[in-house]
Image: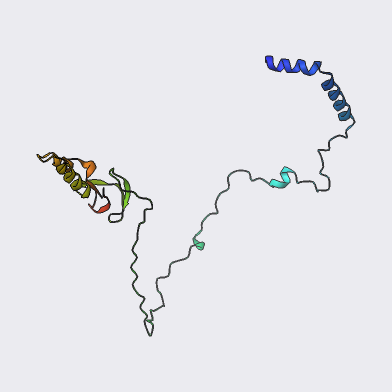
Amino acid sequence: MHPALAAIYLFIRQEPAIQRFCQLTAKNMASAPPVQTGEFVGLPQPPSYEEAVGPQCQGPVLPPAYSKDTQYPYPTHYNQTYQPAAHSTTSPIVSVQTIYVQPGMMFGDVPVQTHCPTCAQVVVTRLEHTSGTMTWLTCAGLFIFGCIYGCCLFPFCVNGLKDVTHRCPNCNNILGEHRRL
């Protein structure tokens, strides 16, 4: 026996209030009426298992045999003729265009997985960096502060200062743009 369980057992055996409770409970249980398990009070008896399940089939159940009389021959001659209507109504041709709205789609400076509406594929975008407003302003700022010997052209070599165009790698369609300024 586990040491903790042994300590609890000894505590219960030595405590007089718990011993008195156990004696009263045992006395009350002895005078309690027996539990009726065979019948329900106020309710009809449930059916037995055999009555509820019914007769069981012995062996596998086979499908009914097919005979020649149950097959119907296909008709070879139809007596129906097509009668055109006296006036014909033309229904308008409806063109359905599916528009994909992608809520919360933020095009940044990293490729994103998105749905291309042109080729109807889920793709990871291909990036194209182009010189934008931020690139030209940085170049002008460096030129003003004394980088006139070609150092002002460094912003055109840094992709982090350029605008980003997201394109579909399959159909080359523009899916989105990210402008720095």
Which sits in the foreground, 44 or 52?
44
Residue in front for this viewpoint, 96 or 44: 96
User: Position of 168 compared to 106: left or right?
Assistant: left
Q: Is residue 14 left or right of residue 85?
A: right
User: In which quadrant is the N terminus drawn?
Assistant: top right
| Residue that extends furthest to the left in the rendered view of this protein | 149
Residue at horizontal 35%, vertical 75%? 92
Q: Toward the viewer: 98 or 108?
A: 108
The residue sitting at 71% across, 47% down in the picture is 52
**Residue 103 location, x and y as percent?**
38, 53
x and y percentages locating residue 21 in the rendered image:
84, 25
Instruction: Report the colour scheme.
Output: rainbow
Q: Position of residue 115 (x, y in %)?
A: 32, 51
The mark tally for this picture is: 0
User: Among all residues in the image, which is located at the extreme bottom?
Assistant: 86
Q: Position of residue 22 (x, y in %)?
A: 84, 24
In this picture, residue 47 sits left or right of residue 70? right
Q: Is residue 130 among the parts visible in the rendering?
A: no
Q: Examine the rendered structure and indicate whether residue 28 appears above or below residue 118.
A: above
Q: Is residue 163 visible?
A: yes
Q: Residue shown at 16%/46% (left/top)? A: 140
* Residue lying at the far front of the rendered structure: 145
Q: Quadrant of residue 93?
A: bottom left
